[in-house]
Amino acid sequence: MRLTFLNNKYTQSRGMTLVETVVVLALFSILSIAIMTVISSFYRYNAYTIAQAYQVDSARKGIELLVRDLREMTYSDNGAFPLVNRATSSVEFYSDIDRDNSVELVRYEIVDQTLFKYIYESSGIPAVYASEPSRTETISEYVHNDLEGVIMFTYYNNQGVELSGTGVSEVRHIDVAMVVNVDPIREPGKYHLRSSASLRNLKEYDI
């Protein structure tokens, strides 16, 4: 009886056999493959939604930056009027965007469904602005205002009346609208983002 007891104890304390190890590894491999397949399927079927959400968030941050720059537009370092050019898909103005007490010339423009920000620095006395941008920033991609027939920039005077033409002296308020869609053919569809800017530094010149 004592010998049998020792044999049982020895049997219970021994390690895994080769067969048991192979079975465990096989089960682990099957489980790993299953998990990776589920993750891969999730990203494959949700890639559009994830990409769309990313672009919408990027556009939201971009439009906040644009509106902030518009609100702070001011007279240039050489005394030129704050708003330089206005159009439905672009706007050009002076603003101290980096808060360094030197006013930059800034242009926002949609080019091939991408909203760009061009920044021009000044130099010399009197100040002269460079003909080429010192840097260019990509603000938002997949901008489909043209496909949707949505105007990016709409301009108003101090009475809230929408302005026609290309004149800049009466502009006191700018509405901004952006349509973002990674793939116009698929759903969920386009996202509309809207904001507005009152030109703070021009209020004192209103009559």
Image: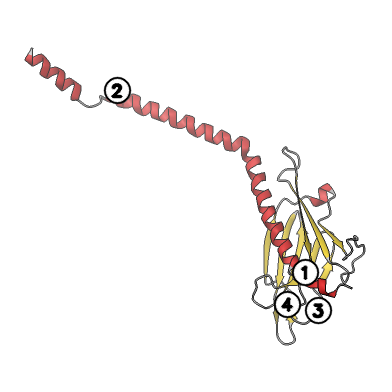
Q: Earlier in the sequence, mark 3 or mark 4?
A: 3
Q: Nearer the viewer, mark 1 or mark 4?
A: 1
Q: Which mark is residue 80?
A: 3
Identity, as a three-letter code, of the amino acid under mark 2:
Val
Q: Which residue is mark 1?
A: 200
Q: On screen, 23 above or below 58?
A: above
Q: Position of residue 71 (x, y in %)?
A: 75, 66
Indicate left or right for 20 with 181 as reference: left
Q: Which residue is mark 4?
A: 130
Does residue 83 appear in this view? Answer: no
Identity, as a three-letter code, of the amino acid under mark 3:
Ala
Label 1: which secondary element: helix
Residue farthest to the right, as pictured: 165
Label 4: which secondary element: loop
Q: Position of residue 151 (x, y in %)?
A: 84, 54
Q: On screen, 204 above or below 158?
A: below
Identity, as a three-letter code, of the amino acid under mark 4:
Ala
Q: Which mark is residue 19?
A: 2
Judging depth in this view, the residue of 31 and 153 nearest the camera is: 153
Does residue 115 appear in this view? Answer: yes
Q: Earlier in the sequence, mark 4 or mark 2?
A: 2
Q: Earlier in the sequence, mark 1 or mark 3?
A: 3
Q: Earlier in the sequence, mark 2 or mark 3?
A: 2
CA–CA distance between discs 2 and 3? 85 Å
Q: Earlier in the sequence, mark 1 or mark 4?
A: 4
